[in-house]
Amino acid sequence: MSEATSESNGEGEYVRTEGGRFAAGTRAGPGRPPMSSPMGKFREVLWSEIKEHDIASAIQTLRDVMSDPKAKPADRIAAAREMLDRSAGRPLPTDLADLVEQAERLAVQRQEPEGDQ
């Protein structure tokens, strides 16, 4: 086990391992308050101004573009992609999904008693 060191920032003790990581049992700090950055403040104003009918209108615009036979195919595909990305979520890259499956298999194998394999 690595040796832990202690440091204080005036607000409390933070125990770290030799590698610089927080030691087990160290209480987390308060972090940054939500919406404290300039972008966070912008989002807060934006969310306060967006109404339910604005969201419905944006969705209808995407539907209109997707179903417009005169729209460019690229625009129709982009509108469809936006609808799917926002509703179903963006698909994971295949290699990442494969890595997750491998990790899950390893986790299951490690949980099984040695005689059950």
Image: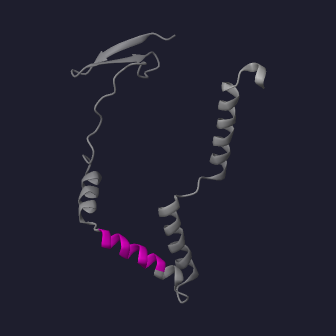
Find out whether residue 60 is within the magenta segment.
yes
Where does the image place residue 115, in percent across and percent down from the top left? 78, 20
Q: Main secondary structure of the magenta part?
A: helix
Q: Residue furthest front?
A: 116
Where does the image place residue 85, in percent across and percent down from the top left? 51, 63
Where does the image place residue 48, in percent across and percent down from the top left? 24, 61
Residue drawn at (45%, 15%), measured in percent from left and top? Answer: 18
Rendered image quadrant of residue 114: top right
Residue drawn at (45%, 9%), measured in percent from left and top? Answer: 3
Q: Is residue 94 left or right of residue 80?
A: right
Is residue 26 placed above or below 55 in the rendered structure? above
Q: Is residue 31 left or right of residue 75?
A: left
Please name whichever residue, 30 or 114, is drawn nearer the observer in this view of the structure: 114
Residue range highlighted in magenta: 52-63
Is residue 35 placed above or below 71 in the rendered structure? above
Find out whether residue 2 is within the magenta segment.
no
**The C terminus lies in quadrant:** top right
Where does the image place residue 86, in percent across and percent down from the top left? 47, 63
Rendered image quadrant of residue 32: top left
